[in-house]
Structures are given as structure tokens and as C-alpha cells.
Image (cartoon, rainbow, N blue to C red):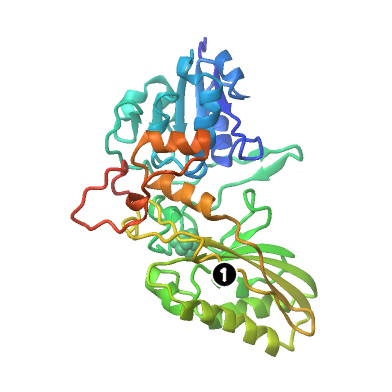
Amino acid sequence: MCTKKIAFLKVKNRNNSVSIGALVLMDELSRCGYPVEICDYKTAFNYTHVLVSMTATDDIYDIFRQCHKNNWENRTFTAFVGGFGCQNPVALSGFIDYAFFGRADGIIADYLNDPEKYYEHSFKLTAPHLVTLRQVEKLYPYPIIYGANKSRWVEKFIGCPYRCKFCHYSHNRNYIGDGIYINNGISTGSPEIMLKDICNLTEKLGRLTAALDGYSERLRFLFGKKITWDMVEDAIDTLASFKGNTYFKLYNICNFPTETEDDEKEFIDFFDDYTSHTKKADGIVKIDIFNTAFRPSLNTPMERSPVRLYPEARRENPDIVSQNGFVVKYTHLAKGAKEHLKDVVSIRYCDKAHIEKIALHDNFDFDLTDYLREYPESEELNFKFIQGK
Ligand code: SF4
């Protein structure tokens, strides 16, 4: 008889729900005969094993705050953390027992029975050591049914083949998949597609999300995202060829190393020119551009790169509107200075006291140099717990 009582924690800043990765593990555990429930920080005490998923590295603040508030220092259960954002979870050592790095599907039941067996991919947070990310060889084979509407999710891709030099997604997951990448957009609310594939769309999406990631061709080619302005033009032409309105959410990265005002001008000029010269649109495309500042992930070729902070790069540009209704709109930055700084600190973690200061008091009153500077190759990174792939 199964004596374990297992639950996945509902994380507040994720719409009070669990992530798709968590749903995959819940599905696998129940197929292995371990039914899994959902708990919150209070009801966690009714279980023997509680799993916590970090989708983004800055989830650490919310988890820290809630664990502190709900007395997880005195927990009666074994707590595990993992997920895509689990890069530097050591500051949670007072609240969580084990961290797992990489994909846990295929072994999750075995891991919960004996976490020490997976020393290569997991550690006790009180005794961290260097780990490798666990990779899988195949996509998760079962569909996941989720949400009130019983939506169906099937894994079609893992990772990305393009290897942009700052990208966690590419450098920390083996790539599996082929064909046109269209994610159903559980996290962004609209289908996500590679910008280069938009010109191959044969059906209108209506709403879609893609990423450009660099103000200029120079920056994009320097850091791995090989998208020319011609490709952007083809993509927008394709969207404009579908009748009716299309909403296009376009992510961009600013504050790259070596970026200058000329790079940004190239970006503005492109959209300005395109908008003022376009005559051929059958449909109206509204482009919302979301800028977020460069913050390289650990275990990527740019992990040692310097980071610049807002507010000096926080600029908002006027919308560009053509006579036939084509609009390029700069949405206010999705992340402000503090949020960006939080991300950077959570990636370049050095000291638990700093995470606690931010999580409990929103206090950034400490020397930031170590979070922002460039790290020479000869220097050992004291915030790095993951090696290779
Ligand atoms: S930034 Fe996008 S295109 Fe580049 S490697 Fe990451 S997921 Fe792929």
C-alpha cells in the first residue's frame, strides 16, 4: 500500500495554478500508482512529500516569502524543488530539502523514493554540490488535460536548435522536435511561433507571440539570433495578408552588451519605414513590442557577461501608426527596474541574506557590483551549481 501522501504546491504568482511541467509529473506519478493532490503553503502540512515548481528564477522570492510566512522551517514533510527556473535555489535551504535539476519525468517516482540515488542531478539544499541537468530522450508520451475547460496539451518540442548565446531554453534542454514550432501559449495566452516561421503560415492565427531579441541585425547576429530585417518584413507582410485584425506580441531584448543608441535607432527606423511605406495590407496588424533587459541565464555562453540596469535604458517610444491603420505600439516595459534587478540577483545569487532582504522587505540596499559586472573566464563562479548539459 502506498504510504506516501504527495502534493504539488500551487504557487501564488503563477495564477494560483501549477505549471505544465508539474502537470506532467503529476500525470506520471499517478500512472505509477501515486495519486498527487494540489496543496497550498498551509495544507502542505497534510502531506508527506511536497513538490514545488520554479518556472522562472525569480519565483524564489515568492516561495521564500510564503514559506517564511507559513512556517516551513518547522515542516513535517519532505519538500522538493525543481523546474525550469531552478538554477540557484540554495537560498531556500531553510524551507526545502532537495532540489532537482533538469527533466524529472521518467524517474520521478523513483526519485521521491530515494533522492540520494540521483546525486548527479540533485542535492540537499543544505549541502549543495555541482550537478548536471538531467535530459530526456523523448517527448512526454501522454496528453495532459488541464484547466476548467479541460484543455488538452501534447508535448511537441523540447528546447530549441538555434542556440542563442544567452538562452536558457536552448542551452539547458536537449532539443527534440521538428517542423514548425507553434506552442499553444499556455504561459503567454497566445500561440508562440518562431519569427522565421511566420512567413510559412497558411492560416491566420489572429493573436500570436514571437521574439526578435535585438534592436539591430548586428546585435542579433552577434548573440545568435540570426534574424534579418528582410525576415521581419516577410513576417509582417504575411500577417498583413490575412483579412481582419491580427494582434502580434513581439518580444525584444534591450541592454545587450555593446548596444548603442544606433542599434535602437535601426529598430525604430525599420518599423517607421515599414509602417509609412506599407500599402499592401489586407488586414490590420497591431504589433505590441515588449522590451525586457538582457539577463543571461546560467550555463549559457553569455553567463559571464555584464548586465546593465534600468533606468538609463528605460525609454518609451511613441506609437507608429500608418494611414491604413497599421500600428506598431511600444507597450510599457513588462518589467521595471526593480523586477529586472530581482531577476539578475536571483540568477547571480551569492548570499541568502540578499534574497531574504528582497523577498521579505523589498530592500535592495546592498552593493550590486557582483551581480552586474563581467566575470573573467579565470574566475570561479560562486553562484553556479549546474555544469555542462
Ligand atoms: S532565444 Fe529563442 S530562438 Fe534563440 S535559442 Fe532561445 S528559444 Fe531558440
Question: How many marks are shown on the rendered structure?
Answer: 1
Residue at label 1?
195
Q: Image quarter for residue 179?
A: bottom right
User: Residue 209, percent across and down?
Assistant: 63, 62
229 with respect to 128 (left or right): right
Residue at 74%, 89% in the rendered image? 279
User: What is the secondary structure assignment of the residue under circle 1?
Assistant: helix
Q: Circle 1: is it few (<14), some (14-19), or many (20+) Cα within 10 Å?
A: some
Residue at 43%, 40% in the rendered image? 86
Above/below status of 305 relative to 200: above
Question: Can residue 121 be seen in this snapshot?
Answer: yes
What residue type is disc 1 on?
A: Leu
* Residue 295 vs residue 310, the one in the foreground: 310
* Residue 114 vs residue 312, the one in the foreground: 312
Above/below status of 372 relative to 358: below
Residue at 31%, 57% in the rendered image? 304
* Residue 111 vs residue 312, the one in the foreground: 312
User: Residue 298, percent across and down?
Assistant: 36, 50
Question: Can residue 53 be seen in this snapshot?
Answer: no
293 with respect to 135 (left or right): right
Above/below status of 202 relative to 167: below
Above/below status of 91 relative to 284: above
User: Residue 15, percent across and down?
Assistant: 66, 39
Residue at 34%, 52% in the rendered image? 369
